[in-house]
């Protein structure tokens, strides 16, 4: 999501250069953790100010779009058409950002738990298998019959 924003590379570059100027560290290797911490703080602040809460923004855009479409149905005007077009583009951007957010989140989750040959993977497989097991059958009168399958 961040990489699609044109201001992100500049933020990283400026933050990194500013944090490299600390005189207390003599070598580049000893400055690296400081630079990384500074960069992380700048990115978190930028993300909060630049994107805000993605889900709230999407909800607000959708509400505004619905309001404009109601107004267009009552009294069409070129201004409302252009505003609707602009908000539709913003809403589509928000949807794309939400898609990227969930895609990244799922990858992070998967990276945290590793590949398929792990305890986590096997536990998830057993959990899915137990959830898909048939325990009772119901007849036409909705009476459950215990079944041992």
Image (tube, grey):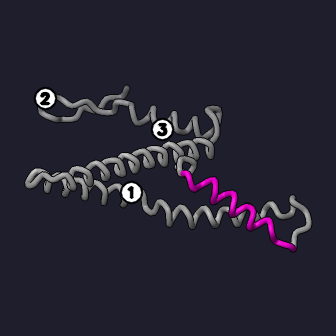
Relative to 4, 24 lies left or right: right
In percent of width and height, residue 102 lies at 47, 46
Q: Residue at x 52, y 38 (%)?
A: 124
**Element at label 3:** helix
Callout in the foreground (3, 1): 1
Relative to 109, residue 139 above or below: above
Which of the two discs, 3 and 1, labels the residue nearer the N terminus?
1
> Residue under circle 1?
55
Sequence order check: which comes first, mark 2 or mark 3?
A: 3
Question: Dividing the image into 4 quarters, which one contains the C terminus?
Answer: top left
Considering only vertical position in the picture, is 81 above or below 126?
below
The quarter holding residue 116 reads: top right
Chain part drawn in magenta: 6-23
Q: Which residue is drawn at 24% across and 54% down?
A: 65
Residue of label 2: 140
Residue at mark 3 to residue at mark 1: CA–CA distance: 30 Å
Callout 2 crowding tier (Cα within 10 Å): few <14, some 14–19, many ≥20: few
- Asked whether 18 falls inside the magenta stretch, the response is yes
Residue 47 coordinates in the image, percent (x, y)? 53, 61
Q: Which mark is residue 69?
A: none
Question: Which residue occupies the foreground of this view, 8 or 82?
Answer: 82
Q: 10 Å neighbourhood of mark 1: few (<14), some, or many (≥20)? A: few
Residue 19 painted magenta: yes
Q: Residue at x 38, y 57 (%)?
A: 55
- Taking the view exactly as shown, the residue that stands out farthest to the left is 74
Residue carrying label 3: 127
Real-space CA distance between mark 2 and mark 3, rounded to the nearest whole angstrom: 30 Å
Foreground mark, 2 or 3, reads: 3
């Amino acid at each position: 999501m961040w990489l699609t924003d044109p201001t992100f590379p500049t933020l990283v570059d400026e933050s990194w250069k500013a944090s490299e100027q600390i005189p207390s560290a003599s070598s580049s290797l000893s400055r690296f953790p400081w630079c990384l911490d500074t960069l992380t703080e700048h990115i978190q602040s930028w993300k909060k100010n630049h994107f805000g809460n993605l889900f709230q923004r999407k909800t607000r855009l959708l509400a505004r779009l619905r309001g404009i479409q109601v107004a267009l149905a009552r009294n069409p005007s070129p201004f409302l058409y252009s505003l609707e077009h602009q908000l539709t583009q913003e809403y589509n951007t928000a949807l794309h950002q939400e898609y990227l957010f969930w895609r990244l989140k799922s990858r992070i989750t998967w990276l945290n738990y590793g590949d398929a040959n792990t305890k986590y993977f096997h536990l998830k497989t057993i959990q899915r298998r137990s959830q898909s097991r048939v325990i009772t059958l119901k007849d036409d009168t909705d009476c459950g019959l215990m079944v041992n399958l």
